[in-house]
Image (spheres, rainbow, N blue to C red):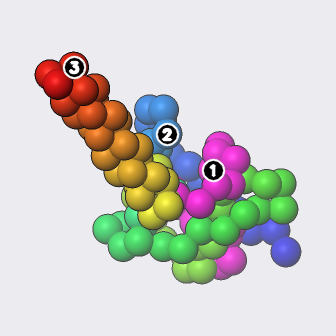
Amino acid sequence: MKAYGIVEEVHKNGQNLNCEIKVLENGTIMEFPYIYYPGYKIIVDGEEIESFESEHGFLAISLPETYKAEIVVEYVGTNLMIISKVISGMTLISIIAYEIYKRKI
């Protein structure tokens, strides 16, 4: 089933996108210009909505009702990515501390 909507205003800045859309039919699937990858947060009128992978491999959401909405797409990363950055930072600090300690002995 195809459904239609009108994108009225788009502002794209790197991994972030803001747009206003008017949904004309129920069941409209909006596909964003991002390859699907976990870690994207999509907010529709201040409320977070679940995303999925479209049949073309892009990030998509389903807009069930006929209305006008403001959509914000942000990449926040996954929990695993945040944990790995913390571990990497702690490892770097440990290596620097060890080198300083070793040179003072």
| Image location (x, y in percent) of residue 3 | 74, 68
Q: Does the magenta stretch include residue 38?
A: yes
Q: Residue at x 17, y 25 (%)?
A: 105
Report the disc number at residue 12.
Answer: none
Q: Toward the viewer: 15 or 28?
A: 15
Residue type (three-letter) at the residue carrying disc 1:
Phe
Q: What stretch is highlighted in magenta?
A: 21-39
Residue 97 is at least partly visible in this image: yes
The kind of secondary structure element at disc 2 is loop
Compared across the picture, whether 34 is left or right of 57 comes to left
Q: Residue at x 41, y 71 (%)?
A: 48
| Image location (x, y in percent) of residue 32 | 63, 50
Q: Nearer the viewer, mark 1 or mark 2?
A: 2
Read off the residue under disc 2.
15
Q: Which residue is drawn at 27% across and 34% down?
A: 98
Q: Which residue lies furthest to the top in this view?
A: 103
The kind of secondary structure element at disc 3 is helix
Q: Distance between the residues labelled 3 and 2?
A: 43 Å
Report the disc number at residue 32.
Answer: 1
In the displayed structure, 69 sits above or below 73; it is below
Disc 2 crowd, CA 10 A, few/some/many (<14, 14-19, 20+): few
Q: Distance between the residues labelled 1 and 2?
A: 11 Å
Disc 3 crowd, CA 10 A, few/some/many (<14, 14-19, 20+): few
Residue type (three-letter) at the residue carrying disc 3:
Arg
Locate residue 89: give its quadrant.
top left
| Image location (x, y in percent) of residue 29 | 69, 66
Read off the residue under disc 3.
103
Compared across the picture, whether 26 is left or right of 69 comes to right
